[in-house]
Image: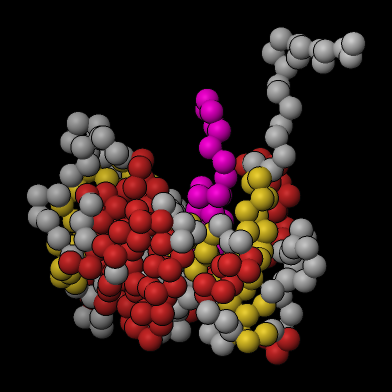
Amino acid sequence: MPEEPPEPAAGAAAPAAAPAPAAVVLSGYGPVGRAYVGHLAAHGEALARDHGVRLRLAAVRASTAEYLPPGDGTDTWAPPPPRAAWGPLPPLAETLDRTGAGVLVQCVPSSPEVRDQAAAETLLALRRGVHVVTATKSHLLSHWRALGLAAAEGGGLIRISGATGAALPAGDLARAGVRGLGCRTIRACPNGTATFVLDRLAAGDSLADAVAEARRRGIAEADPGADLSGADAATKARLLAALLWGWDASAIRTETEGVDEDTAGEARAAAASGHRLRAVASAAADEPLLVRVRLERTAPGDPLHALTGPEKAVVYGCPDAGDITVSGGRSSPLGAALAMVKDTLDVAAPRRPGFG
């Protein structure tokens, strides 16, 4: 009779299971999409070993073209060739069927021009049970309830870390990290450009010089209008509040105060008194469906006062558990891409028993 395999020695680790495969369709190949592919090209094997899932690039879709990696798809994180070598763009349903995709990773621009298309593709994927990881904000704000219903219908998951603060894991805390802790308020500086510009104004820069320096360091967009007006901070706070309290993000009202030429004097006056002027986005469970962005003088000891450069932070006010603050996180295409890698692993990796 064949011998029985020996019992593992006491305390020995069980043999690791082979990583489960997961096909990824990437929609959008701008700076964030390229950073996503580049990170997985460099670290895909380590992620497979550590997290039990081998992510495979099954397709890359842009506005008018699609790239399908050649061969059997087992080694497909090499950057796609120039766009001229891509094929025509088929309907997303065809791509999902052809690739057997388990995850749609979406990093198309958060603009009104592509909002409806982004929403349609997300709804299609979720209804088919394909998980969605997105850094695109526009359709989250306009189709929040519809996306939730589509996910429930198809059994898919949707993760939005890249839309709520790049590498800052604020969305994870709002969605699950403070669950059951009785969080009643959010105070946040979720826009690094605004924080950086306010500190430069306090140091004596003009608004134009402060914005120019932010652009030079790669902090500010070419058009920083949404950053300085408070619109971007309001958007991120809307998404966090929707995750936290179950609000419909599309129904949340906003009141914003922006950074303009007249803000420099206020920033310098705050600094002279030991304070720092901050663009603070806030929401409260007792004021449903309302997000405010205001310029506040923050005092030493306030986590928002302690921010430097383009750092971001969110303070979750939990009366019984105490305030819980998350801060830091790189605000860059790589930071957003890493947030999306984290979310992809979250939806695609098999659930492990015990501490896993």
Q: Name the residue: 63% across, 59% down.
A: 23
User: Can you give x and y, in whole percent of width and height, for residue 54 in the image?
Assistant: 67, 50
Instruction: Examine the image and state in which quarter residue 112 appears.
Output: bottom left
Rendered residue at 20%/56% (across/down): 247
Where is residue 203? Give x, y as percent: 36, 69
Give whichever of 222, 176 is nearer the camera. 176
- Image check: 314 left or right of 247? right
Q: Exactly how many numbered labels are in the figure?
A: 0
| 69 is higher (above) or lower (below) than 187 | below
* Residue 230 image position (x, y, % from top left): 26, 72
Q: Residue at x 70, y 34 (%)?
A: 17
Viewer-proximal residue among 121 and 217: 121
The quarter of the image holding the N terminus is top right
Q: Which residues are magenta?
A: 334-356
258 sits left or right of 205 in the view: left
Q: Is residue 169 magenta?
A: no
